[in-house]
Amino acid sequence: MFQGRLFEGKIFVITGGGTGLGRSMAHYFMSLGARVVISSRKQDVLEQAARELAQETGGQVLPIPCDVRSYDQVENMLAQTISHFGLPDGLVNNAAGNFLSPTERLSHRAFDAVVDIVLKGSYNCTLAFGKKWISEKKPAVVLNIVTTYAWTGSAYVVPSACGKAGVLALTRSLAVEWAKYGIRMNAIAPGPFPTKGAWDRLFPPQLSEALKPEIRVPLKRVGHHQELANLAAYLMSDFSAYINGEVITIDGGEWLMGAGQFNWVERVATPDMWDELEKTIRAADEKRA
Ligand code: HXC
Ligand code: NAP
């Protein structure tokens, strides 16, 4: 979508940046000239991703291991970013944990594990980075990766739904409170974008045929990583300077498909049935008249 060196001179930190959508965003931001920190728990995964990203884009990337659930580790990750690249211009809260399970089967530790990565991880990073930006008087941008069930809720992924709803509240709250410091905050709510992390935990082989995401998406396909990276680049760039506190859905119409009462009519009423159906409906009207 963008060309040239849109992000020349910019420094961005992406949590969960070594895999999946985080890696795809890192790739695109680096292609556009940004220096990028990718951060997550697994050092070997990060280091391999960093090597590949540098090779693929010719850009600069720094892998920093950090568990976002620990505020001390987040502060340490920020300090390393500053000493290597300088004070970052933006943060993408992308790290997440999730798995499919009936809620009554979860231990309280399982519930904590997911909410702590998603919500606590996002506010830990936002707080540490925000304090620094404010004290240094540096304008900045935060992008939070949520999901569409942040506002609808969803069965079988309840800790994730609770965590993502909290992150959406964080987005809308701080967009207002920190605007005076020149800090913008937005969110992206992706629909299904195939990644190993999500697919292994949400579409196990026994269910994957029945749960096939394409069936529920009006556009009848999953998302391409580049499509999400395009939107993320826009929201991290100055082109979106007047967008603040917004959540942008990128799901091919999936969540609205589940919401509209008659959206499923086409499943049962094929186009050749409509002459007959119209006759029946009109006839019922005439009987009443
Ligand atoms: C029930 C489970 C479980 C499962 C773990 N637990 N997996 N309980 N069903 N499938 C329990 C454990 O038994 C333990 O409880 C507690 O959860 C913590 O487990 P740990 O393995 O110690 O946790 P940890 O190492 O911190 O790993 C966190 C994790 C893991 C969330 C469990 O899956 C992970 O690392 N995920 C990161 C990547 C990820 O999830 N990516 C997908 C994002 S997809 P006890 O009581 O035994 O101690 C996404 C997309 C949404 O968000 C929308 C898609 C369309
Ligand atoms: P993914 O590859 O599994 O990404 C999750 C990342 O988070 C991993 O790199 C993981 O790395 C990191 N992470 C997990 N726990 C962490 C912790 N405690 N500290 C630091 N990093 C941690 O899955 P994905 O599909 O790309 O998901 C990326 C984002 O998109 C998530 O916010 C997810 O909720 C959102 N999303 C995805 C989809 C989809 O269809 N894929 C749909 C809606 C929303 P480590 O294990 O090395 O820590």
Image (cartoon, helix red, strand yellow):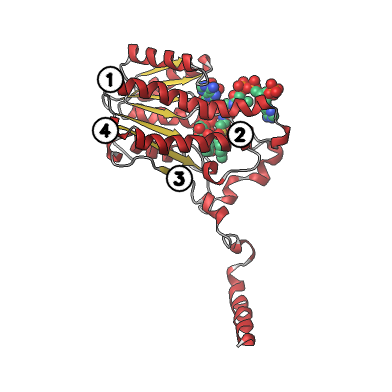
Which picture quadrant has residue 237? top left
> Which residue carries the number 1 mark?
136
Tag 1 or tag 4, which sits nearer the N-term?
A: 4
Which tag is nearer the camera, tag 4 or tag 2? 2
* Residue type at numbered disc 3: Thr
Cα separation between marks 4 and 2: 41 Å
Tag 1 or tag 3, which sits nearer the N-term?
A: 1
For residue 160, say whether it is visible: yes
Vertical side of 251 occupied by 198: above or below: above
**Residue 159 bears which disc, if any?**
2
Vertical side of 227 occupied by 42: above or below: above
Looking at this view, is 109 or 8 the one in front?
109
Q: In terms of secondary structure, where does tag 3 sit?
A: strand
* Residue type at numbered disc 4: Gly
Looking at this view, is 245 or 204 the one in front?
245
* Residue type at numbered disc 2: Pro
Mark 2 crowdedness (10 Å alpha carbons): few <14, some 14-19, many ≥20: many
Cα separation between marks 4 and 1: 29 Å
Specify the quadrant that holds the N terminus: top left
> Which residue carries the number 4 mark?
4
Proximity of marks 3 and 1: CB atoms separated by less than 8 Å: no
**Residue 249 bears which disc, if any?**
3
